[in-house]
Amino acid sequence: MIKKTVEKALNDQIKAEFDSAYVYLAMSAHCESVNLGGFATWLRLQYEEEMAHALRLYDFVNIRGGRVTLQALAKPPATFGKPLNIFKEVLKNEQKVTGLINKLYALAIKENDYPTQVELQWFISEQVEEEKTAGDILEQLKMVGDHGASLHRMDRILSKRGLEQQ
């Protein structure tokens, strides 16, 4: 049986993952509205990943005999500016989620909750990858700027995310 402190923290993390997903979906919609379909595709897939993370935690709480308590999500902004600004926010968001996962892991250690520690190791590895990917795209955007042929090429490259797995 899962301890109440860990259950509450996991429920908070589920909310954080859903919040993150919702913001990525709003970013995707923004990119669609400004004809950056590749960026929109990348962000939509990021939304789907965050949803999968939330559901993984949702299932974990249930498997451990806990109770999932869903929380309200905040309304995300409707506009986000240029791609450079968007990816500054993406990286900041991923760093925030990493911090939350790290705090959750520390709680699992404090509570001697070994199953939660094992589950969170997957999330820790995932966050290393998430931060690297967001950081790489941000650095590329700093090089190419917010307009022109280089941005168009980046948009085309980002549109291929997910195709490499097929």
Image: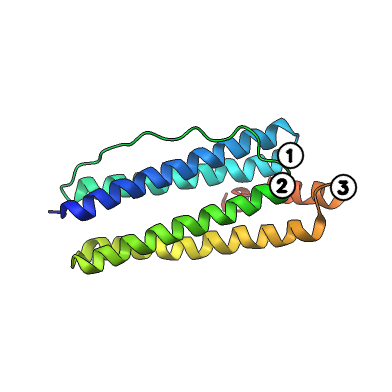
Q: From the viewer's perspective, tell me whether residue 86 is left or right of residue 153.
A: left
Using residue 79 as the reference point, say whether residue 45 is left or right of it: left
Disc number placed over residue 92 in the picture, else none: none
Residue 160 visible (yes or no): no
Determine whether the residue tagged by mark 2 lies in a helix, strand or loop: helix
Residue, disc 2:
83
Residue under label 1: 36
In this view of the protein, can residue 3 be seen by the observer? yes
Q: Is residue 34 left or right of residue 57?
A: right
Q: CA distance from mark 3 to mark 2?
A: 12 Å
For disc 3, the marked residue is: 148
What's under tag 1, amino acid-wise?
Leu
- Residue 164 in the image: above or below residue 39: below
> 127 left or right of 110?
right
- Between the C-alphas of marks 3 and 1, the distance is 12 Å
Q: Amino acid at mark 2?
A: Pro
Q: Nearer the viewer, residue 124 or 160?
A: 124
Circles 3 and 1: CB distance less than 8 Å?
no
At 79% from the left and 61% from the top, the residue drawn is 143
* Discs 2, 1 touching: Cβ within 8 Å: yes
User: Going 35% across and 65% down the picture, which residue do you hit?
Assistant: 121
Residue 125, position as x, y percentages in the image: 44, 65
Label 3 neighbourhood size at 10 Å, few (<14), some (14-19), many (20+)? few
Disc on the earlier residue, 3 or 2: 2
Residue at 20% over, 49% down: 63
